[in-house]
Image (tube, grey):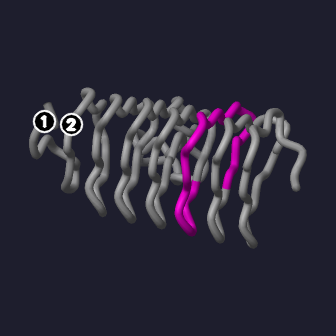
Amino acid sequence: MVNLKKAGKNLIIDDLVQIHEPERVSVGDNVTFHYGVFVFPEGYDITIGSDTHFAPYGILYGPLSVGNKCAIAAHVVLASSAHTHDRVEVPFVDLPLDKRKITIEDNVWIGANAVITPGITIGTGSIIGAGAVVTKDVPPYSVMGGVPARLIRKRK
């Protein structure tokens, strides 16, 4: 067991889960990190509510906030940082990072292989379809899909 900043009851951390900077990671009760999840705060806090699970091989970069009762499918990338690309005379690796907090509110389901980009908020009760790339905030109770993700329908 790693020494997290906060660890709720019934925390499950499967084999090959990597949690860097555990002192920056807080999780609620009944949280599961399945096989191969990679948690990398990058100097920022990551907070996860209760009754939330992360399927195998997801990647979580900080800063990040995930609510209660969320289902994060396999191979999801929560990418709070990305390379900027506005200066063509400078190699990508030498450009500053675009680093903005991702906020996932309560009761959100993110399908397999989805990517959430920096600064995004996903509203309560929303569904992000498998393989979607979310580049804009998602209003509550939305079903989003595609590349880039677009509204498919509202849930209520």
Q: Position of residue 28 (x, y in %)?
A: 67, 36
Occupied quadrant, residue 27: top right
Disc 1 and disc 2 in contact, CB within 8 angstroms: yes
Q: Which residue is mark 1?
A: 154
- Badge 2: residue crowd in 10 Å (few <14, some 14–19, many ≥20): many
30 or 98, nearer to the observer: 30
Instruction: Answer with left or right where residue 67 lies relative to residue 27.
Output: left
Q: Is residue 142 left or right of residue 62?
A: left
Q: Is residue 48 magenta?
A: yes
Q: How many marks?
A: 2
Relative placement, left or right, of 66 versus 124 is: right
Amino acid on which disc 2 is placed:
Ser
Does residue 136 sit above or below 14 in this rendering?
above
Q: Relative to residue 132, is residue 43 depicted above or below?
A: above
The dot on residue 107 is none
Residue located beneath label 2 in the image? 142
Q: Locate the C terminus by quadrant.
A: top left
Magenta: main secondary structure equals loop
**Residue drawn 57% across the image and 68% down it:** 57
Distance between mark 1 and mark 2 Cα atoms: 5 Å
Q: Which residues are magenta?
A: 39-59
Q: What element does badge 2 sit on?
A: strand
| Residue at the image point whose x is 53% and y is 63% from the top | 55
- At which x and y percent is residue 42? 71, 42
Q: Where, quadrant-wise, is the N terminus in this rendering?
A: bottom right
Q: Could you say which is closer to the camera, residue 58 or residue 133?
A: 58
Give the residue at the far left of this rendering: 153
Magenta span includes 34? no
Amino acid under label 1? Answer: Lys
Of the two numbered discs 1 and 2 on the same chain, state the one appearing first in sequence. 2
